[in-house]
Amino acid sequence: MNTVRKRSKQRDSIQRFLETRRDHPTAETVYHHIREEIPNISLGTVYRNLALLSEMGEIRKISTDEGPDRFDPITTPHDHFVCRQCGSLIDMEGTRAPHLIKEAQKGFEGQIDDQRTFFYGTCPTCMKKDQSA
Amino acid sequence: MNTVRKRSKQRDSIQRFLETRRDHPTAETVYHHIREEIPNISLGTVYRNLALLSEMGEIRKISTDEGPDRFDPITTPHDHFVCRQCGSLIDMEGTRAPHLIKEAQKGFEGQIDDQRTFFYGTCPTCMKKDQSA
DNA sequence: ATAACAATAGGAATTATTACTGATATTAGC
DNA sequence: GCTAATATCAGTAATAATTCCTATTGTTAT
């Protein structure tokens, strides 16, 4: 009954590709790059494996107000910044507040497992663009 | 060139409906309810007005890892809980950490305007379901 | 080696959202 | 109140994002 998770070169390739990136690609971006290595991979396989890897805790799915879902190979807790203008997603260092979960759990009837904090605004690149315009 | 924002009964109705709800409906849910009042309203109109109201700062769009976008009539800062099992979105009271933006802004080249924190886990209702199963 | 079955490709189907178009409704200025 | 200007609308088409289906292939335990 306990299903054994078999490896596949497609999933390995997706995971390896993600690890080379610091910019949190979308499924579409992953698809286009993996196709250089495995030309006949299908977009469905990419989506399924990104979901599987998330489930397995190997990567993280990140949904923001701007654009499609993105994927992050770094699973250690950290926050993100989202640019309202260009939609870029940037890792934030040293902003994590680990006590928030414990605080929130107090008096809450459900079970809290995870916390995600996003900062929204204008990224450095768009700031420069705005100034020169 | 400065466009004048005209009122419409459709937008008013959408805003009024949202204000009666504490459960952060999806565009689809809004659509179905507004149709009872304005039977020939189109889904496109609902989407457009939800986007307009968000832009105007009257409501908030909320994207989570689970399910479609949701809309919140309360624009004062507060956090949310997302159930991984049923996707329900719950307001969290007293969890806000207002200093986070200031902290994050330190040494960050961009401009931070907003902060969103989500807690993920199992909601009270699903906890009970799991126990009885 | 081979049986068992997880994972795949490819494409169809579904869901979520945006864009377009000609008609209608709102608002500012008279 | 009337009218001109134009934002908004309904309806629909189009696009984007994601999931589902089926026959086939690949991986692993024995």
Image (tube, coloured by chain):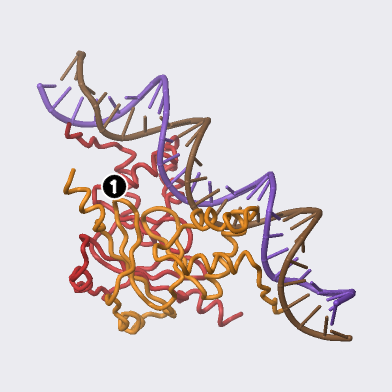
Chain colours: A red, B orange, C brown, D purple
Q: Residue at x 32, y 51 (%)?
A: B86
Q: Residue at x 31, y 80 (%)?
A: B100
Q: Which residue is the site of mark 1? A: A53
A127 relative to A56 in the view: left or right:
right
Q: Position of residue B89 (x, y in %)?
A: 35, 61
Residue B35 or C10: which is nearer the viewer? B35
Count residues near mark 1 (Cα–Cα under 10 Å), then give few for <14, some for 14-19, many for 20+: many
Chain letter of the residue beneath label 1 in the structure image? A
B97 relative to B56 in the view: left or right:
left
Q: Is residue D10 above or below residue A109?
A: above
Q: Residue at x 58, y 66 (%)?
A: B13
Q: Quadrant of the C terminus of chain A?
A: bottom right
Q: Is residue A13 above or below residue B54?
A: above
Residue A69 or A41: which is nearer the viewer? A69
Give the quarter of the image for residue A107: bottom left
Q: Position of residue B64 (x, y in %)?
A: 38, 59
Residue B34 or A66: which is nearer the viewer? B34
B27 relative to B108 in the view: left or right:
right
Q: Position of residue A31 (x, y in %)?
A: 44, 45
Residue type at numbered disc 1: Leu
Q: Quadrant of the N terminus of chain A?
A: top left
Q: Residue at x 56, y 79 (%)?
A: A130
Q: Position of residue A83 (x, y in %)?
A: 46, 70
